[in-house]
Amino acid sequence: MTLSEAAGDPGETIVPGEIEALVPWYVAGTLRRRDRQRVAEALRRDADLARHVDLVREELAETIHLNETLGAPPPAVVERLMAAIDAETDAAPKRLPGAVAGWLTGFFANLPPRTLAVAASFAVLAIALQAFMIVDIFTKPRPSSEEAALSGTPRHGAFAMVRFAQAASAAEITKFLQSYQAALVDGPTEGGLYRVRIAMGALAKEEIGKIIARMRHESIVESAEPAEPTESVAPAVPAASGH
Amino acid sequence: MQVLFARHHVRVYRFVLRLLRDEAATEDVIGEVFLDVWRQASRFEGRSAVSTWLIAIARFKALSLLRKRREDGLDDETAESIEEPSDDPERALEKLDKGQKLRQCLAALSREHREVIDLVYYHEKSVEEVAQIIGIPENTVKTRMFYARRKLGELCRVAGIDRGWP
């Protein structure tokens, strides 16, 4: 494990020994296992090499120290980066159709003819199936607008139509719903009414009346009225004053 | 993206700063690196560590900037070949302890030498990774590291530290 100095300019012709050249990576712990074993074996036999390891350790420690004192970029760098990414994200949808078209062109261009023929057969089948479904949908009798409006809303339980004060925050509305163990199930209508389920099961009219009377005294409630279980927010609902 | 930035930006910044020795230019390069990464995330093939990929991009951008500066006549090659700590370096170095002197000598290495030393010692890159980042064969990486250390030893001797090697 010694340096061999060839003829000519010594500064340019000294060739490191194979093991000696690996010592920096050995000390840094980034050598492959086989090379690590070779260096470890050489270290057991060669005292000079062991001393060389100490020099490398010293260099490594001071290189880390030097780099650690270089500081870090200011927060403005990440702010500028995120602003640039936001600007590109906003512009991205405009570029998308072109990109997709390009990808599709490339994709189909790379398909062999047999694959293309099979894919085309499946495409024809899919189009036929889609046409059948469209005809089926448009020729079946459609439900009324009220039925449609209610199709996605729960029908079981006791309900109220509530209008919240404009200044009511989401947190206040959430707290209100929690205190009544209620849930928003539909709305808002154009008039700002929400359909609120106040009980999972049916309640007596008096019981519903009491709950609604309490609701009307809440500062974030402008109005509250009982609603029928099948009632939708879509039809006009009289907006009674809460106070 | 913020996680990636948070995890890697300091090391990439330091790597570029050691190449450019210009904080403002380094900040610009860092921004460009991570913006490029965001744009080209799909190109990352996972064959190397993310940090290796980032440093390779950062190095390319830093060297492009240096090349442009050189073309514009703004880069002072002599300033980066060896940076002497003062007008009378030997006297200044005498006042420093051994660690400080060694760091002065590390800072005085040429760009090529400090780059390979930083990659191996600070960024903990293997021979293969350094070869990938710099774009040279693995044997050249080992030789370059050897010469960088040898040059460091010479600078140390001038600074009054006899390390017994080379």
Image: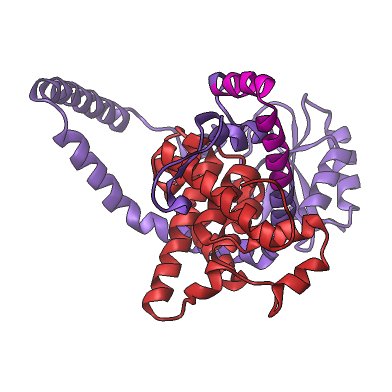
Chain colours: A purple, B red
Query: Which residue range is magenta in the image?
Result: A35-60
Residue for point 63% across, 38% down = A231
Image height of A153 relative to B18, above or below: above
Q: Nearer the viewer, residue A140 or A112?
A: A112
Residue A121 horizontal side relative to residue B10, left or right: left
User: Which image quarter: residue A166?
Assistant: bottom right
| Residue occupying the far left of the picture | A113
Res A153 visible: yes
Image height of B68 relative to A22, above or below: below
- Residue B31 point in image, percent of width and height: 54, 62
Residue for point 71% across, 35% down = A51
Q: Is residue B129 magenta?
A: no
Residue A231 horizontal side relative to residue A210, left or right: left
Residue for point 57% across, 33% down = A20
Residue A123 horizontal side relative to residue B4, left or right: left
Residue for point 79% across, 63% down = A167
Image height of A177 relative to B5, above or below: above
- Residue A237 point in image, percent of width and height: 66, 50
User: Which image quarter: residue B106?
Assistant: bottom right
- Residue B165 point in image, percent of width and height: 65, 46
| Chief SS of the magenta region | helix
Image height of B28 relative to A169, above or below: below
Q: Is residue A47 magenta?
A: yes
Q: Nearer the viewer, residue A54 or A221?
A: A54
